[in-house]
């Protein structure tokens, strides 16, 4: 997985703070971390929303010409697509996967929030 730790993220030189990007990332964090129902972590509509938001971030970063940030969003999109494309996932699988996505986003928010 790309998000090994803050040490790996610190070696990258992020671009200036971007409130549009940060807001989208924070929204995706909330989506991953907060299902509409505690009993339905695999809600297809929610997972599709996460998939669209991660793709939006990926496309946005590709057009900002920052390969390091683009790599982060490609990996994030890959994690979410893996969850979305899983056939008949269990609720436990979806919860664990969504928590993994949320943890990755949280670490990214910490680094990106420190940009000036």
Image (cartoon, rainbow, N blue to C red):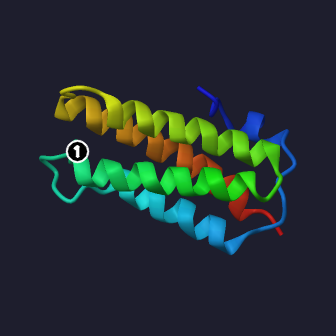
Left or right, residue 10 beside residue 103? right
Q: Percent x, y for residue 114?
A: 75, 62
Point out the image quarter for the C terminus: bottom right
Q: Is residue 21 visible?
A: yes
Q: Is residue 47 above or below residue 91?
A: below
Residue placed at 46% from the left, 41% from the top? 101
Report the residue that reaches farthest toward the left: 39
Q: Is residue 81 above or below residue 105?
A: above
Q: Which residue is mark 1?
A: 41
Is 113 or 74 nearer to us in this picture?
Answer: 74
Q: Is residue 85 above or below residue 68?
A: above
Residue placed at 44% from the left, 39% from the top? 80
Report the residue that reaches farthest toward the bottom: 19
Point out the image quarter for the N terminus: top right
Is 1 or 5 nearer to us in this picture?
Answer: 1
> Image quadrant of residue 8?
top right
Q: Percent x, y for residue 52?
A: 44, 54
> Image quadrant of residue 92?
top left
Q: Secondary structure at mark 1?
A: loop
């Amino acid at each position: 997985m790309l998000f090994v730790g803050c040490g790996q993220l610190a070696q990258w030189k992020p671009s200036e703070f971007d409130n549009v990007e940060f807001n989208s990332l924070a929204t995706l964090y909330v989506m991953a971390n907060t299902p509409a129902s505690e009993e339905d972590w695999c809600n297809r509509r929610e997972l599709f929303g996460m998939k669209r938001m991660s793709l939006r971030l990926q496309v946005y970063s590709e057009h900002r010409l920052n390969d390091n940030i683009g790599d982060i969003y490609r990996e994030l999109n890959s994690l979410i697509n893996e969850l979305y494309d899983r056939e008949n996932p269990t609720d436990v699988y979806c919860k664990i996967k969504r928590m993994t996505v949320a943890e990755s986003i949280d670490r990214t928010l910490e680094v990106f929030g420190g940009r000036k």
